[in-house]
Image (tube, rainbow, N blue to C red):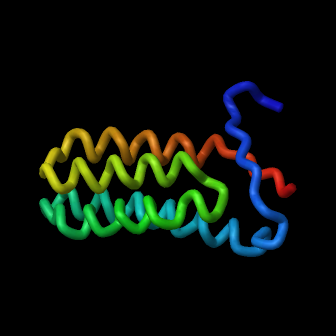
Amino acid sequence: MDPQRIVVRADPEIKDLIPLFIKHRHEDIGRIRECLRQSDFETIEMLGHSMKGVGKGYGFAEITVLGGQIESAAKGRFAEAVENLVRELDTYLNCVDVIYE
């Protein structure tokens, strides 16, 4: 396995849900970037809160952490911090390999 890859261990019972979960996080990234262009921090805060709530349940603890950080940055209206966190989330999603066990 590539050392740049990140391994996430997920419950095999939700195997069919994981691709959609990841797809939705990629969509969240696009929505957050659009919201940044419009200075819509309320929606960004809501999206971050949602990620914080669902990440760990799907086995993606890092998404829970990043979602909480995005939520906090949006509350403070820190656009640059939100963009940096979204970039980090994008990198994470592109490097993740899921193992079902």
Q: Which residue is drawn at 36% across and 43% down?
A: 85
Specify the quadrant of the image occupied by residue 10: bottom right
Establish if 15 lies above or below 36: below
Residue 17 at x, y percent in the picture: 70, 73
Viewport quadrant of the C terminus: bottom right
Outermost residue to the top: 3
Q: Residue at x 73, y 25 (%)?
A: 3
Q: Which residue is drawn at 52% across and 41% down?
A: 91
- The number of numbered badges drawn on the structure is 0
For residue 59, side relative to residue 23 (left or right) = right
Q: Which residue is drawn at 31% across and 60% down?
A: 32
Establish if 50 lies above or below 73: below
Viewport quadrant of the N terminus: top right
Establish if 40 lies above or below 101: below
Residue 5 at x, y percent in the picture: 70, 35
For residue 83, side relative to residue 61 (left or right) = left
For residue 27, side relative to residue 33 (left or right) = right
- 39 or 73: nearer the viewer: 73
Residue 60 at x, y percent in the picture: 61, 53
For residue 42, side relative to residue 70 (left or right) = left
- 23 or 11: nearer the viewer: 11
